[in-house]
Amino acid sequence: MENVIDQPLALLGGPRAVTLAASRLEAACHWPIVGEEDERAVIDVMRAGTFSALDVTRRFEAEMARWHGVSHALGTCNGATAAQQAMWAAGLGKGDEIICPSIAYWASALPAFALRATVVFADIDPESLCLDPRDIEHRIGPRTKAIMAVHYRGHPCDMDAILAVARRHRLKVIEDISHAVGAMYKSRKVGALGDVAVMSLAGGKSLAAGEAGMMLTDNRELYERAMAFGAYERTKDELSTDYLVRAAGLPQGGIMGRMNQTCAAMGRAQLKHYPARMAEIHRAMSRFWDMLRHVPGIVPHRPSPSRYPDTTMGGWTEPLAHYVPTELSGLPAARFVEALAAEGIPPCRGVSFPLHLHPLLNETDIYREGRPTRIASATRDVRQPRGSLPVSERIAEQTLGVPGFKHDDPELIAQCAAAIRKVAVQAEHLLQSQIVESSARS
Ligand SMILES: Cc1ncc(COP(=O)(O)O)c(C=O)c1O
């Protein structure tokens, strides 16, 4: 392997470190893994024509609740709907605030707007890339109702610290486990740690069931409130909370949140194999990271045992590396990615754009109220300018997407690790060549 890393970089005309066919890398990273069992289950629903019934969904919900160790699960048509139902269930209404990470998919935050509530972002922890518990308390105001803890890219949040803040201020904690189904936080499964959990079960998520979502909770009232919001057809039989029963028969959210049963069928088949598939992902990703030990500038995004004992990644479908430019002669992450692509590793998904800088969060008047929606119903101006969340704002330059291996293919993993090592050890040379190139051009 040593000779591979000493060869000239492919970007500068040398041979590629990954010599196996691109299709092998694609196959090793393909997700979800769909087999005959999924196909049969989906076809059964199609043939029965029971897309909009509830029997298969109820079975899936019961299995998910049992697997997570909670009493209630409510299937939804997607993760954004599960988030909206959970926010409303948690008490968010006009003028209320929810604290969210800015580095997250929009659905962990934006459903608040449709409830006439608003979002306050807290910064992320540079190691976990999840909500930083030390940055939450000073952002809590009199109208704060909840905290959205997103287990970002499979890494569990520091739930003990987040829950401690929440309990001190009587806030509800919503976990978003879309990226991290099955992750363990200090020996406890994520999704059962806060007051309520939501997840997307869409195509590329950790547990993929087509286009669906789910909410989990141990709290009967939260479960019934979520049901009252968007699962009207269940409300006649299943509600027991007096003030909710009065409005049974129509959805209080005015939405249809029901899961399509083809998705429930696929979800059941996926869940059966999930632990074994996750174990293989862990084997493959651990092999990959072990091969990159001591490579300058590249650090795995995964829980460090000293800070997070008995904690594991979940899902891990789109893994990240921390990128330390100071150990790589200041080489920008984008140039590193370019060099990796030339070596045979196409760019992998990096972190998301910081939500607090997007115009929708600062200027857009969605409901024609004469003010940006972010502050239209708020009791204070909660907009956060550039500079207010420094870690979130710089994290794109300090992280890289890396291949998400779903199969333990030692030869392929070794070649990919060698490609990363090769670019890292030649970072200074790469930077110099760029300087020479640009001065020759000018
Ligand atoms: C963390 C997170 N939460 C929620 C969602 C929303 O899920 P859906 O696309 O199923 O609405 C996503 C989707 O990407 C997500 O990544």
Image (cartoon, rainbow, N blue to C red):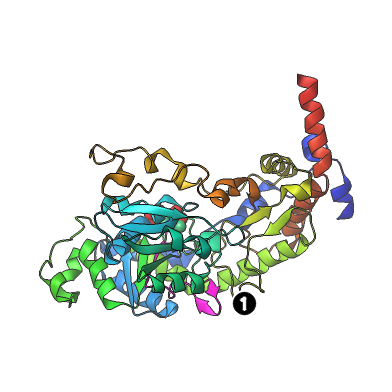
- Residue 81: quarter of image: bottom left
Seen as rendered, the residue at the extreme top is 442
- Residue 428: quarter of image: top right
Query: Residue 122 location, x and y as percent?
Result: 47, 56
Does 256 appear above or below 221?
A: above
Q: Quick check: 370 left or right of 268?
A: left
Q: Quick check: 282 left or right of 429?
A: left
Residue for badge 1: 309
Q: Quick check: 334 left or right of 41?
A: right
- Quadrant for ligand 1? bottom left
- Pick the quarter of the image with the C terminus: top right
Please report the residue visible at 43 percent of the width from the left and 75 percent of the height from the top.
Answer: 192
Query: Which residues fall within the magenta stretch?
Result: 183-202
Query: Residue 291 location, x and y as percent?
Result: 77, 62
Q: Is residue 373 visible?
A: yes
**Labels in figure, total:** 1
What is the three-letter code of the residue carrying label 1? Pro
Does 32 appear above or below 274?
A: above
Does 26 appear above or below 441?
A: below
Front-most of residues 372 and 18? 372
Within the magenta stretch, is there residue 195? yes
